[in-house]
Each structure stands twice: as structure tokens, then as C-alpha cells.
Image (cartoon, grey):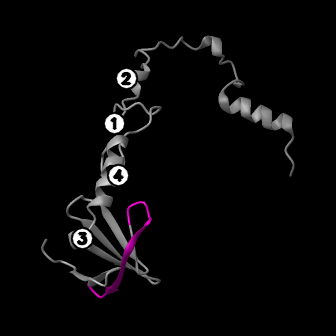
């Protein structure tokens, strides 16, 4: 059964009320009045935050501005020590294990993955390697010093 375009158009006009069978007509209908005022954009849209979305955000990971971010990176490089690290957690999936470490002195985050210690920008920390064994992480430095960290250990 094929329906022609003319019958589809007629059906559409009938459904929207343009074609009304019988004596009723659009001119006979009473005029509709608007009882409420139209909403303005400010009344209709109330954003959660007042930040302008077209301006660059100054918040980055640890809620520091872009100028202090570079200063924090310089401090972290000069004061890094494996003895300041604290084991925050261990993640394990079917392929690998990862350990999340935090620096108690600077607050920087590190990840031990596949034997390499990575900083928050996924760059390898030179001279430090490690192993994850159960709920324990063993970190080794270039000068053969070993530091063991246990999960759920007090700082």
C-alpha cells in the first residue's frame, strides 16, 4: 500500500488543525490571552558557577593557579626524596598493578607502574625504580638505597 504525498500532506494538515471538518473554523475560536510574562534569559538560566566559560580556567588539579604550578614543580624537583613518600593505595586489574604515592613534604602525587616511578605528568622520575609485592611497595634509588612502604601505615 503506497501513500501519496498529497494524502500525507492532507493528513498532516488535519492533525495540526489547519483543516477542520465541519462548520468549526479558526475564526470562530476565541482569542487566547497570555497570562504570564515571558521569562528573560537571566530568569530562565541560572548557572551553578559564576565563572565566564569563555575565559581560561586557572584551576588545575590541586587548585593552584598557573603561576604557582610552575613554582610547585621547581620545589618538588629540588626537595624530592623517596623517604618523604607515603603509600596511598594499590590498584590491581587483570594486566598489572599500580601504586599511588604522595609526597608528604610537597603534596605531589606519584604512580609506581611497571617498575617505574612516574610523576603527575606521567614523566619518569630519574634514578628511582620500584616493585609492588602484595600490600607493600619497595622503592630503590640509584645509589642502591631501599625504602619499604606498607599500605595502611601511619605517617
- 121 in the magenta segment: yes
Which residue corresponds to mark 1? 48
User: Dot 1: few (<14), some (14–19), or many (≥20) neighbours within 10 Å?
Assistant: few
- Foreground label between 2 and 3: 3
Which residue corresponds to mark 3? 85
Asked whether the beta carbons under mark 4 and mark 3 sit within 8 Å of each other, the answer is: no
Q: CA distance from mark 2 to mark 4?
A: 33 Å
- Foreground label between 4 and 1: 4
Which residue corresponds to mark 4? 61
**Earlier-in-chain disc, 1 versus 2:** 2
For the residue labelled by badge 1, is the local secondary structure a helix, a strand or a loop? Answer: loop
* Residue 64 in sight: yes
Q: 60 left or right of 17?
A: left
Asked whether the beta carbons under mark 1 and mark 2 sit within 8 Å of each other, the answer is: no
Q: CA distance from mark 1 to mark 2?
A: 13 Å
Q: CA distance from mark 4 to mark 1?
A: 20 Å
Which residue corresponds to mark 2? 43
Amino acid at each position: 500500500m503506497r501513500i501519496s504525498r498529497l494524502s500525507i500532506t492532507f493528513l498532516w494538515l488535519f492533525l495540526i488543525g489547519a483543516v477542520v471538518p465541519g462548520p468549526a473554523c479558526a475564526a470562530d475560536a476565541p482569542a487566547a490571552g497570555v497570562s504570564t510574562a515571558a521569562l528573560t534569559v537571566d530568569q530562565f538560566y541560572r548557572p551553578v558557577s559564576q565563572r565566564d566559560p569563555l575565559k581560561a580556567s586557572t584551576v588545575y588539579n590541586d587548585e593552584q593557579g598557573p603561576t604557582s604550578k610552575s613554582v610547585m614543580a621547581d620545589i618538588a624537583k629540588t626537595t624530592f626524596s623517596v623517604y618523604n613518600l607515603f603509600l596511598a593505595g594499590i590498584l590491581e586489574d587483570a594486566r598489572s598493578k599500580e601504586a599511588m604515592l604522595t609526597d608528604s613534604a610537597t603534596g605531589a602525587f606519584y604512580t609506581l607502574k611497571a617498575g617505574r616511578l612516574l610523576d603527575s605528568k606521567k614523566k619518569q622520575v630519574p634514578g628511582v625504580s620500584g616493585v609492588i609485592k602484595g600490600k607493600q611497595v619497595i622503592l630503590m634509588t640509584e645509589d642502591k638505597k631501599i625504602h619499604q612502604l606498607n599500605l595502611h601505615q601511619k605517617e
